[in-house]
Image (spheres, rainbow, N blue to C red):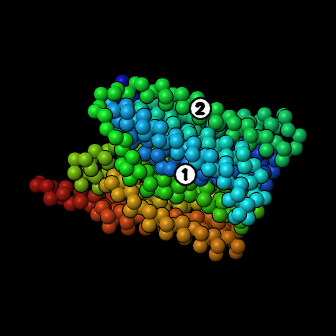
């Protein structure tokens, strides 16, 4: 099988698993809303958002660079450096977990959150954060070591299966919804720690497969930190944008409204897979053009990717505007209030696609730090917009605030990429490329 066919085959399987896992989470959340009520679903979404944000910090950015360095050390046949990197990443997770367990309750109490959902279920939340952080590191390393299925399936497939299985089990064992919710969190936390340890075995058994012929060198700690520090901030703000938003909104929306908005964001995330797939497919071609210093070809590929991504985003916006209300009704009649907010959020997907993959292009040009000011502007806009719009318009205000923040963020990143790399990453690049091609064609002799 050729490399291209193998990559397409693996990508299709992984993408299918991701969609299947997202579907399982969708079913689990719908059942929680139907059988336990929207309030408990809102609490569950707060727990998930908190776990995501805690766990993404625990490796201190080493999970964001694990794939890169695992692949590099494998290619250089440098098992010592890989083992040193691996040990450092897991040490970070262990130390930060101890810090979370020891200082977490005190920090929550000091912040006036002693009675919050996270504080009332602190230990299972901490266990789930530990399992998630270990899986993040495991997955990054396994992908770099060319074991993508072992890397991806824990988070994309096994975690959703665990959530649904835990919910169905406690329906039989627990007498009340509140007791069932607590028991479910314990099952999910302990279960995911077990999943992470099994996946860790795959990592450790993969290590001896890397040859050890490179000359001994001191651990490249300074180099690891130079890459890790900006990417942990970028990862928190981009991959977990709506987790941050849900925690911000938990102080201004009821648990029922929070559950409705949370479901809308999950549907939005599912829709965004289609756009993310476009850039995932075209990234190798962009890297190849950049390596060859072929600026015209690089611009053409960026423009084509944006055109396809924008068309997909417009299609998804239309689909969600029509079918979104029916999907929301699966959670209960109260969730029909999320139809308009869902459409507004999906409009944000169009904005992001039109303005292009600025963070990706900045990273290709080895300037990931350049994204941070735009990210800060976007998050500041989110906080301010929530403060101004949510008290007046409720759910609709939350969606408008998110749309405004995504727009400001995307515009700031576009301007940053244009200034730092002299590359227009927006859809305008496609029109320029088409116009230039038409001009060249018109100048051909005999035409």
Residue at the spot x=28%, y=63% of the render? 422
Between 169 and 11, the one nearer to me in the picture: 169
Foreground residue among 168 and 263: 168
Which image quarter: residue 435? bottom left
Q: Residue furthest right?
A: 175
| Disc number for residue 57 | 1
User: Who's the residue at 69% across and 36% down the image?
Assistant: 190
Which residue bears the numbered disc 2?
197
In space, the residues marked 1 and 2 are separated at their CA atoms by: 19 Å
Instruction: Check disc 2: other Cα within 10 Å, few if <14, some if 14-19, many if 20+.
Output: some
User: Which callout, 1 or 2, points at the residue further toward the start of the chain?
Assistant: 1
Binning the other alpha carbons within 10 Å of mark 1 as few (below 14), some (14 to 19) or many (20 upward) gives: many
Residue 323 in view, yes or no: no
Quarter of the image with the C terminus is: bottom left
Q: Quadrant of residue 367?
A: bottom left
Provide residue 187's location: percent of width, then percent of height. Answer: 73, 37
Task: Tell me if I can see residue 108 in this picture.
Answer: yes
Tell me whether circle 1 and circle 2 mark residues in contact (CB < 8 Å): no
337 is higher (above) or lower (below) than 87: below
Residue occupying the point 57% across, 42% down:
94
């Amino acid at each position: 099988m050729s490399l291209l066919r193998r990559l397409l085959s693996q990508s299709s399987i992984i993408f299918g698993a991701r969609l299947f896992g997202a579907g399982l989470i969708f079913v689990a959340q719908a059942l929680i809303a139907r059988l336990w009520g929207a309030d408990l679903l809102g609490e569950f979404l707060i727990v998930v958002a908190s776990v995501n944000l805690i766990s993404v910090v625990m490796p201190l950015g080493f999970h964001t660079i694990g794939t890169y360095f695992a692949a590099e050390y494998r290619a250089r046949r440098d098992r010592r450096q890989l083992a040193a990197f691996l040990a450092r990443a897991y040490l970070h997770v262990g130390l930060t977990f101890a810090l979370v367990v020891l200082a977490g309750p005190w920090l929550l109490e000091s912040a006036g959150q002693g009675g919050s959902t996270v504080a009332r279920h602190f230990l299972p939340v901490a266990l789930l954060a530990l399992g998630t952080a270990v899986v993040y590191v495991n997955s990054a390393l396994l992908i770099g070591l060319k074991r993508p299925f072992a890397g991806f399936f824990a988070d994309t497939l096994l975690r959703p299966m665990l959530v649904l299985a835990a919910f169905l089990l406690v329906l039989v064992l627990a007498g009340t919804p509140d007791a069932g919710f607590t028991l479910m969190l314990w099952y999910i936390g302990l279960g995911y720690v077990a999943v992470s340890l099994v996946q860790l075995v795959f990592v450790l058994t993969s290590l001896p497969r890397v040859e050890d012929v490179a000359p001994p060198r001191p651990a490249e700690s300074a180099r690891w930190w130079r890459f890790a520090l900006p990417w942990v901030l970028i990862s928190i703000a981009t991959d977990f944008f709506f987790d941050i938003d849900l925690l911000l909104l938990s102080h201004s929306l009821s648990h029922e409204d929070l559950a409705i908005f949370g479901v809308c964001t999950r549907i939005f995330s599912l829709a965004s897979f289609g756009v993310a797939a476009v850039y995932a497919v075209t990234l190798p071609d962009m890297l190849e053009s950049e390596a060859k210093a072929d600026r015209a070809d690089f611009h053409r590929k960026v423009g084509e990717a944006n055109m396809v991504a924008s068309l997909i985003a417009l299609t998804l916006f239309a689909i969600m505007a029509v079918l979104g209300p029916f999907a929301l009704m699966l959670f209960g009649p109260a969730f029909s209030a999320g139809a308009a907010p869902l459409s507004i959020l999906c409009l944000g997907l169009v904005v992001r696609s039109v303005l292009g993959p600025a963070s990706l292009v900045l990273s290709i040009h080895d300037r990931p730090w350049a994204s941070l000011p735009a990210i800060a502007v976007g998050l500041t806009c989110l906080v301010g917009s929530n403060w101004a719009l949510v008290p007046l318009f409720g759910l609709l205000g939350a969606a408008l605030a998110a749309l405004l923040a995504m727009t400001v963020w995307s515009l700031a990143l576009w301007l940053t990429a244009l200034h730092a790399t002299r590359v227009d990453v927006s859809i305008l690049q496609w029109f320029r490329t088409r116009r230039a091609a038409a001009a060249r064609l018109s100048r051909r002799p005999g035409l």
